[in-house]
Each structure stands twice: as structure tokens, then as C-alpha cells.
Amino acid sequence: MKKRFRIFPPIRIMLAAGIVLAVVLMAGSAMSCQPEEGAPEETDQGLPTEQSSGSQPSTSPVTEVAIESFTFKPAEIRVPVGGTVTWYNQDSVVHTATARDGTFDSGNMSRGDTFSYTFGEKGVFDYYCVPHPYMEGKVVVE
């Protein structure tokens, strides 16, 4: 007669809990705050002060918009015709930069991803984040 190896219920529960804990720890370390290789490095200062206000339109030649703390910073930016705007996702969740009129759509951007769009004509381009529609921004092309 063949003997079967038997694990007692309390040991089985501890073994299962240990496996679950190991998987969670491995997943957590894979999603750590370390930047991916080749990803742009972040600085303690973040973007220049003139961009960080979020509420005042930027009229400088800066063409970068940070996606940070569930907001676009700055919320409004002005660029000349032919100017390029680059969005940088600095949040730990997926965001988009999607024009309300369909002109541009970044698709899902994870932390560290960027999206650039060159504006070829004058106009006002309102945009938002598809997963978080309360996040709104505006590009004014002059």
C-alpha cells in the first residue's frame, strides 16, 4: 500500500499564507518607486516654478505639462503655431491627455511615460484624462 504525504490543516493554511505573502512582496518590489531604465529622471524641484502653479496660464516657451497629483500642471499652456507640447505622467496611476474635439489622444500613459503633440493651427484645445474626467487642461495655440 502506498503512503500519502499528508499536511495538517494549520500547516496548509500557513503554507498558503506564506506563498501569498511572497507573491505580494515580489509584485510590490516590481512596482517600486525606482524609475525604469531609460525613464527620465525626476528631480526634487520638479518642473520650473512658472509651470507648477497649475492655475495660471503659462506664456513662456515651456512646452511641458506634468501630470501630477491628479492634475495637469500647468492647467493652461500657450504655444505658437507649430509648437509641441509634451505631457509627462509623474503619478503612479495611468492617465491620458485626450482632446475633447478628438485632435489628439495620448492613450494610456503609465508613470514615466510621455506623449508629445505638435499643434499645426491656431485655436483653443481643451483636453482631459479619460480615466479621471475631472482632470482638465487647455492648450492655446497663437
Image: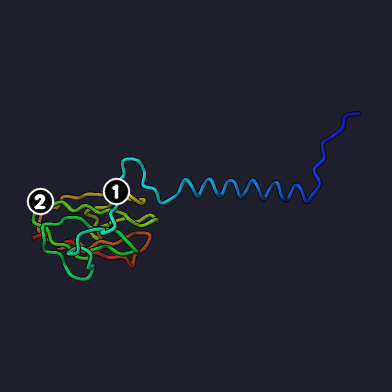
Spot occupied by residue 45 in the image (x, y as percentages of width and height): 26, 59
Out of 11 and 78, give the one closest to the viewer: 11
Q: Is residue 86 above or below residue 127?
A: above
> Which residue does the image show at 9% across and 58% down from the upper left?
122
Q: Which of the two labelled residues, at mark 1 and mark 2, occupies the earlier sequence position?
A: 1
For residue 72, the mark is none
Residue at the spot of label 1: 41
Tag 2 secondary structure: loop
Residue projecting furthest to the right:
1
At label 1, counting other C-alpha atoms closer than 10 Å, the crowd grade (few under 14, some 14-19, many 20 or more) is few
Horizontal relation, residue 3 to residue 12: left or right: right
Tag 1 secondary structure: loop
Horizontal relation, residue 69 to residue 82: left or right: right
At label 2, counting other C-alpha atoms closer than 10 Å, the crowd grade (few under 14, some 14-19, many 20 or more) is some
> Which residue does the image show at 84% across and 35% down from the upper left?
4
> Which residue does the image show at 55% across and 48% down from the upper left?
25
Q: Quadrant of the C terminus?
A: bottom left
Q: Is residue 105 above or below residue 53?
A: above
For residue 82, the mark is 2
Spot occupied by residue 42 in the image (x, y as percentages of width and height): 29, 52
Spot occupied by residue 68 in the image (x, y as percentages of width and height): 31, 61
> Which residue does the image show at 75% across and 47% down from the upper left?
12
Amino acid type of the residue that numbered disc 2 sits on in the rendered structure: Gly
Residue projecting furthest to the bottom:
55
Amino acid type of the residue that numbered disc 1 sits on in the rendered structure: Glu
Spot occupied by residue 5 in the image (x, y as percentages of width and height): 82, 36
Quarter of image, res 136: bottom left
- How is the structure coloured here? rainbow
